[in-house]
Structures are given as C-alpha cells and as structure tokens.
Amino acid sequence: MANDVVQGPDFPERDYARPEVNYLNWKQTVSSWLLSQDHKRIGIMYLVSISIFFVVGGLFAIMFRLELLTPEGDLLQADTYNKFFTLHGVVMIFFFLIPSIPAVLGNFLIPLMIGAKDVAFPKLNLASWYIFMVGGTIGVIIILVGGVDTGWTFYTPLSTSYSNTHVFLAAMLVFITGFSSILTGLNFLVTIHKMRAPGMTWFRLPLFIWAHYATSVIQVLGTPVVAITVFLVGVERIWGVGIFDPALGGDPVLFQHMFWFYSHPAVYIMILPGMGVISEVIACFSRNRVFGYEFVAFSSVAIAIIGFLVWGHHMYVSGQAMYSNLVFSLLTMLVAVPSAIKMFNWTSTLYRGNVVWETPMIYAIGFIGLFAIGGGTGLFLGATGMDVPLHDTYFVVSHFHYVMVGGMVMAYLAGIHFYWPKITGKMYSQPIAKLCAVLVFVGFNCTFFPQFLVGWLGMPRRYHSYHPDFQVLNVMSTLGASILGIGFVIPVFYLGWSLFYGKDAGSNPWGARGLEWEVCTSPPDPHNFHEIPVVTKEAYAYTGEETLSV
C-alpha cells in the first residue's frame, strides 16, 4: 500500500472551496446542515441525534428502576415492564452504543487525524445519517403504537409466533439501521486506506485510527448477518415460513447462532472505538507515547478477528454440545488477551508518564477501572460451570453494563470532553466537569455493583417482581441510578454554556500531538487543511515537557 496517496485515481480532487467561513456557523439555514457533505457537520448531526435517543432510552430505564424499588410489581404491569426493558435495550444498543463513537467522533476526527480533506465518499456519509434517522423514526413509531416485548435479542419462537406486539416493525428497524453501520464502516475503511497524507504510514497512525479500522471490519462483515437474521424473523412472522419456530419445522437455536455471530462482535463495535479514545487521552495527559504502540495497534485487529469466533458462549444453556461449549470457553479466554494487553500497556504508559489530571483523564481512569471489572466478570461467564447458574440472573446484566456503560460510555464522555475544544473552539468549566466525572463513576458503581450481588444470590433478570429479600440491593441500585442520571445531565448544561460563554480554546489547549491538534484550527476550517500536510514523525511524539494552555 503506497503511503503517499492522498487523492488516488478513484477519488478525483473535489472542489473544497465552500461559501461558509466556518463550518460551525449555526446561523446558516437548516437545509445547509441537512444537505451538508462535510464530515464534521455530519458528526455533529449524529451527536445531536444520538443524544436525543440516549435521553429516550434513559427514560425507559428510569421507569423500570422505579418499578424495582419495591418487590410487588406495583408501578408497571408485567407486559408493560417487558416493553420498557425491550425498548431501553433496542434504543440504547442500536441508536446509542453502536453508533456513538464511530458516528460522532469517528466521522469528525478520522479525516483530520490522517490528513485528509474529507471521507472518501461524502454523499454516502450523509446518506448513512439519513438511513440512521429512518431507523430512529421507525423506533419512535414503535413506541407510539405500543412497543415490543421480546427483549432486544428478539429470541424465537416468541418473536416469530407468540408475541402480539410490533415485532415486525422492530425487525425492520434493525434491518434498515444496519445499512447505516455498514456504509459508515465501508467509508472509514476506504478513507484510511486511500486518503492518508504523505508520510502517514500504518505505524504512524494514531491508535484511534487503528481502533476504528478494526471496528469497520466488524461492521462490514458482521452487520449483514444480523440484518438477514431479523429479516428472516419478519418473513416467518408475516408468511409463516418455518425457519426458526419448531412448530413450523424451524430451529430456534439456528436463530441464536446467527444472532450472536454478529451480536458478540457488536460488543467490540461498541468498545473498540472507546479503547481508541482512551489511548489518545492517556497519551496526551501522561505526556508519553503509548507503551508498546505496535502491540496495542495489533491487539485491536486481534480483537476484531477473535471476536467472530466466540459467539457460542452466549448459548451454553441452549442445548449446545458439551464439546462445543469447551471450545467456545477456551476461545473466550483467548479473546480476553488483546484487551488485557491494552490495559497493561495503558497502565505502563501512566507509570512512565507525567500525569495531568484534567477532565478527560478522569474519565479515562474511570474507564480502566470499570472495564477491568466488566472484563474480569466476563471470564466468569465464559466458563461453562459458572455461566449455567448465572446465565439468567442480574449478574449478566451487571457484567454487560460494566463493559458497555462503564466502558464505552465512560470512553465516549472522555472523548467528548477531550475533543470539545477542537469541535467548538470553546473551553468548558473544568471544576464542574471534574465533579461530574466523579459523580458518573460513583453513581455507576452504586447502580450496577449491587446487581452483581443480587444476581449471585439468584435474582432472575427480566422480572417485574421479585422476592422481598432482594429489595435492599435493588433500592441501592435505584439510588445509584439517580446519581448516575444527574452525572449524565449536568454536561448538557456546562457544555451548552461553553458554546456561548466559554473562553476560546486555541488550536491546541491540551498540548496534544497529532495532525488534528498541531495543524488544524479549532474549530477546523471547512476544508480541514489549507494544503495536505506531510507527516515526518511517529504518533505521540511527546517529550514529557509539554504544558497545558488551559
């Protein structure tokens, strides 16, 4: 692969002379935003969209956490409770966790980081946002017409034959939204391959780019599988074709194989970009090149590859053969190794660095702590003997949220706070932001650590009522959710305040390294670079003597 290709033969030079002075011109017409092909504006439109979906998914969580304050099931009926936790899962996974970092930060930063003026296919990039919004609109329609009650996994034959809710609409939602993910991944792959600036070799790429490259491979290869799977659910539901329902001659275990073949790698679609963010933040605020850069880079690729081989650890109780369980258990232990490499290397980077405690760094340290717990408990569930008694308990719920919320959301918040000055050109209040980071960390642990305990004691998930012996831990969890909710809401105010009253950030307030910091203005010009930069040094070329300008 030639490393000096900026505009290859398949990507003729485009006219980047645009009428706007600043891409972040809020006074321009709505149509100028909705029809913009600027990757930065598309990233901001994703930011607004997924923030709205995050609020919607959070409201469902608030309702069923209030239900679980008491053991009697006196706030929500069983059917309503089923719909609430299903909609919470569908909205949070498909409209927040999966797209958040790639669609927002990936769209905004990848061209800046590699020295390109845009992504390879700007029109396709805009189309992916519209497809995403079509899927979101279907989600809103589902909520308004009564919801769906199958859980976000749409297990058959409940989803194909027995549920009286709007499963077909939900299947179409996943099917359509999947195309947005596929197109985004394809765009990133081509952009990284073909549009790197001269001198930007593979081993000069920021680890953020490596993480998104691996994520894009999963998106392109894995998403069609789940799209086909939910499409078949719709086919069986509408026409009664025997695919998954045993009463019609189908096989429900086939559905689980197809669903989890995508949905376990989808965990890495959510977490790998977050790991890329953490590498950037730790390198900047420890004033040190990431220890073992090459190992961290290749660990992202290893996670993407091995992640396709471990789907069966979700199926230990499905009647799967004992020897298959053994193989999947061993592979599950193997996929933990690349993640452990990242954790050890980040720790070594901190140990050898000059740590500066700014808000993004606090979120990054929180990520390391919470992801370590989530990953460690994943090894429990990867072992057949432990998974069987814990499979349908709140232990699984807690493990999943420690990885996804404790991992991905902490990384997302770290990335938003790290790149906010670059996106907007404004600084936010550091004392309030630091307090908020601590609130999120404390609130998260108060919410989900009790669920490890209540799950270990045997409380099943997906039930709206429970034994009174579990009430104290559920009250603790709901109290923690209140603190967590406050921690999520406060940033809306101080980040919004910064847009109007924040002091100017300058081009590089953190003293960071990389094209996006050292060459671009804050906010970047509409065309990113006045001329294509030439890269002459490795990534993270810190000397340990840089100072902050904030």
Image: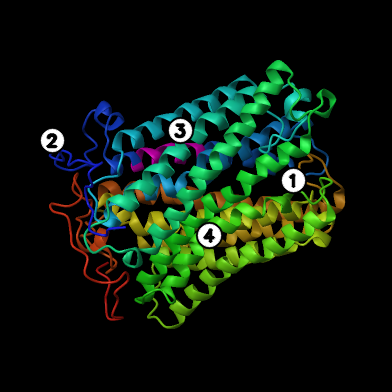
Residue 415 on the magenta segment: no
Query: Residue tagged by mark 1?
Result: 69
The answer to whether mark 2 and mark 4 are in CB contact below 8 A is: no
Q: Percent x, y for residue 106?
A: 38, 50
Q: Kindly state the secondary structure of the residue where label 2 is placed.
A: loop
The residues tagged by marks 4 and 3 sit, at their Cα atoms, a distance apart of 31 Å
Number of callouts = 4
Closer to the chain start, of discs 2 and 3, is: 2
Query: Residue at image x 24%, y 30%?
Result: 32
Kindly identify which residue carries mark 2.
19
Secondary structure found at label 3: helix
Is-magenta flag for residue 50?
Answer: yes
Per the image, the residue denoted by label 4 is 439
- Describe residue 520's horizontal placement relative to residue 466 as left or right: left
Q: Nearer the viewer, residue 183 or 511?
A: 183
Return the residue nearer the eye: 548 or 482: 548
Mark 2 or mark 4: which comes first in sequence?
A: 2
Question: Where is the C terminus found, in terms of image quarters?
Answer: bottom left
Mark whose residue sits in front, 1 or 2: 2
Q: Amino acid at mark 2?
A: Pro
Compare marks 3 and 1 and give the one earlier in the sequence.
1
**Mark 1 or mark 2: which comes first in sequence?**
2
Which residue is denoted by mark 3 in the rendering? 132
Q: Nearer the viewer, residue 52 or 494?
A: 52
Magenta part of the chain: 43-53
Secondary element at image label 1: loop
In the picture shown, does residue 4 fall above or below 106?
below
